[in-house]
């Protein structure tokens, strides 16, 4: 299973800023390895997030996103103690969900 | 503090809920291949139902003036407009211009920050697509330098 | 005729200098770029992995690393990084962080240190080694370097490190000193710190392990030194060899009092 994400969710006023670091190679499919073989495309395609189990974010990503991707967004009406869960799914069908508590 | 096992179990419950919830606006979090294969900014926008792009000061793109390395360039897209359905982040001169597409909902700010790969110095775009297909953009130039041997 | 040309030239120069004053310098722009990356350093991912590996029971002995002595007593990891390399009585050697992790992985967990040392960076157990080094370094983040020089072996290693630093060789006749012994040097846009003295907070040993965005890799000090030697066209030093540790002592002692920012983010 892929390495866990690092999720930080900080409340300020009536919203929560969520910062996520994901562990993923994000191969474009255009790179050649040392032997000259093309390294196949392998990248996160879908990212979703939920606030206390309610879906709040949905995004599509391409291989142009950097390796070990960083994402920042803000959830309205969230507060300390709430749960933020982030899920990614890649083009191979692998998926990972991690959760953090808002501080 | 909960153990990792508890966190993973909780996460699986959440994932299951997300899958079965079937919220309409997230029913199509599927990958839009046309959008990500598109070579130009306009073609990528068209793939998401957007019309001809028009510059707007109500859309903002953020990024560094110079990126020391093209592998990791922080890029942000935001808008103060209401009624926006999608926010796109694009790098004009990349082999495929589209980096990411964010659905805009009432639950989140229309303000997203991520990091993109840039093959060369290029204009970067933030495009807001409205419910009626109107596409508004902001752009800025990001120079990508070739670094040295150290660091 | 001459007079009007010099007036034109002067006017041109004034316009030029005014526009460059209005624009940011390239150096300032690069600083802004680096600042943008500070929040959300992918090194966090490796740090988290390392933290898990410290307590995970592994190896033939099915044991964790929680009793590992990094120089401040068994199991003490906070503050250990900024006191390394130092002399260890149990091995009778001066050791740096990665060398000490090797010792612990072998004696506590039964893993094969020689095999790990031969494994290329980024493969097999070296991935775990890097993660562990990243986490241990993070546990000293912000603390000041304070290597001991009380023991004779530590003093000798400082002198050996200094000799190695200035030793010229390889097909280009380079030494570490070729790039790192003067103020104000740089290669393209990378500043080359003067490592013969305290170069300031977060410089040199105070910046590694670091995540390198250019290749998306986490590098410990051993890999940084290894790559320096590659760039000098020297043969590769052995992983956690005395030569690399001696260099670490020289650089670390020179950095006395500077604050560690490891794990950092680099080009």
Image: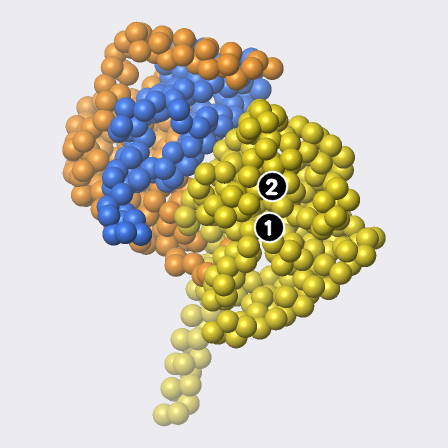
Chain colours: A blue, B orange, C yellow
Coordinates of residue B137 in the picture (x, y in percent)? 28, 38
Determine if marks 1 and 2 fall on one subunit: yes
Task: Pick the residue in front: A62 or C111.
Answer: C111
Task: Pick the residue in front: C229 or C236.
Answer: C236
Q: How many circles with numbers are drawn on the protein?
A: 2
Local secondary structure at mark 2: helix
Residue C38 appears in the picture as rendered: no
Chain letter for the residue marked with disc 2 in the picture? C
Classify mark 2: residues with Cα within 10 Å, few (<14), some (14-19) or many (20+): many
Q: Residue at x 25, y 52 (%)?
A: A36
Chain letter for the residue marked with disc 1 in the picture? C
- The answer to whether the residue labelled 1 contacts the one labelled 2, judged by CB atoms less than 8 Å apart, is yes
Local secondary structure at mark 1: loop
Q: Residue at x 26, y 29 (%)?
A: A91
Indicate left or right for C196 with B142 as reference: right
On the image, numbered disc 1 is attached to which residue? C240
Q: Which of the two discs, 1 and 2, labels the residue nearer the N terminus?
A: 2
Q: Residue at x 32, y 30 (%)?
A: A44
Could you tell me how far apart the alpha carbons at marks 1 and 2 are, in whole angstroms?
8 Å
Coordinates of residue C76 in the picture (x, y in percent)? 72, 32
Which label belongs to residue A78? none
On the image, numbered disc 2 is attached to which residue? C102
In the image, residue A102 sits, relative to residue C217, either above or below, namely above
What is the quadrant of residue A86 in the picture? top left
Indicate left or right for C253 with C47 as reference: right
In the image, residue C181 sits, relative to residue C213, either above or below, namely below
Indicate left or right for C181 with B22 as reference: right
């Amino acid at each position: 299973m892929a390495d866990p994400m690092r999720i930080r969710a900080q409340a300020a006023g009536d919203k929560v800023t969520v910062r996520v670091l994901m562990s993923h190679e994000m191969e474009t499919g255009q790179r050649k390895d040392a032997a000259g073989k093309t390294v196949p495309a392998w990248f996160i395609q879908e990212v979703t997030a939920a606030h206390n189990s309610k879906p709040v974010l949905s995004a599509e990503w391409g291989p142009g996103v950097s390796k070990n991707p960083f994402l920042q967004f803000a959830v309205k009406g969230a507060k300390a103690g709430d749960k933020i869960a982030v899920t990614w799914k890649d083009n191979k069908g692998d998926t990972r969900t991690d959760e953090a508590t808002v501080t | 503090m909960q153990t990792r096992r508890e966190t993973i179990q909780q996460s699986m419950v959440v994932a299951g809920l997300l899958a079965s919830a079937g919220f309409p606006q997230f029913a199509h979090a599927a990958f839009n291949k046309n959008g990500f294969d598109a070579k130009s900014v306009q073609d990528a926008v068209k793939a998401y139902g957007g019309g001809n792009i028009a510059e707007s000061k109500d859309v903002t793109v953020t990024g560094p003036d110079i990126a020391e390395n093209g592998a990791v360039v922080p890029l942000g897209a935001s808008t103060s407009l209401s009624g926006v359905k999608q926010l796109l982040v694009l790098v004009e001169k990349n082999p495929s211009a589209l980096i990411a597409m964010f659905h805009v909902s009432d639950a989140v700010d229309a303000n997203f920050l991520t990091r993109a790969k840039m093959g060369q110095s290029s204009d970067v775009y933030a495009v807001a697509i409205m419910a009626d297909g109107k596409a508004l953009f902001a752009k800025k130039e990001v120079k990508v330098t070739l670094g040295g041997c150290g660091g | 005729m001459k007079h009007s040309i010099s007036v034109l030239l002067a006017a041109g120069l004034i316009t030029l200098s005014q526009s460059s004053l209005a624009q940011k310098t390239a150096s300032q722009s690069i600083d802004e770029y680096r600042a943008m990356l500070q929040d959300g350093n992918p090194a966090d991912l490796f740090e988290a992995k390392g933290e898990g590996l410290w307590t995970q029971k592994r190896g033939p002995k099915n044991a964790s690393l929680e009793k590992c002595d990094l120089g401040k007593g068994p199991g003490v990891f906070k503050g250990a990084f900024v006191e390394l390399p130092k002399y260890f009585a149990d091995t009778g050697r001066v050791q740096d962080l990665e060398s000490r992790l090797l010792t612990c992985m072998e004696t506590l967990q039964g893993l094969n240190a020689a095999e790990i040392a031969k494994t290329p960076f980024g493969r097999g157990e070296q991935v775990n080694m890097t993660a562990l080094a990243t986490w241990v370094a993070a546990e000293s983040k912000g603390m000041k370097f304070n290597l001991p020089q009380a023991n004779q072996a530590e003093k000798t290693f400082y002198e050996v490190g200094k000799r190695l630093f200035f030793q010229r060789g390889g097909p280009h006749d380079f030494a570490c000193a070729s790039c790192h012994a003067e103020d104000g040097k740089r290669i393209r846009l990378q500043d080359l710190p003067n490592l013969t003295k305290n170069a300031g907070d977060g410089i040199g040993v105070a910046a590694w392990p670091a995540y390198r965005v250019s290749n998306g890799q986490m590098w410990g000090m051993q890999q940084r030194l290894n790559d320096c030697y590659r760039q000098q066209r020297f043969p590769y030093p052995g992983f956690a060899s005395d030569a690399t540790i001696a260099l670490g002592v020289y650089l670390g002692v020179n950095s006395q009092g500077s604050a560690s920012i490891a794990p950092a983010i680099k080009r």
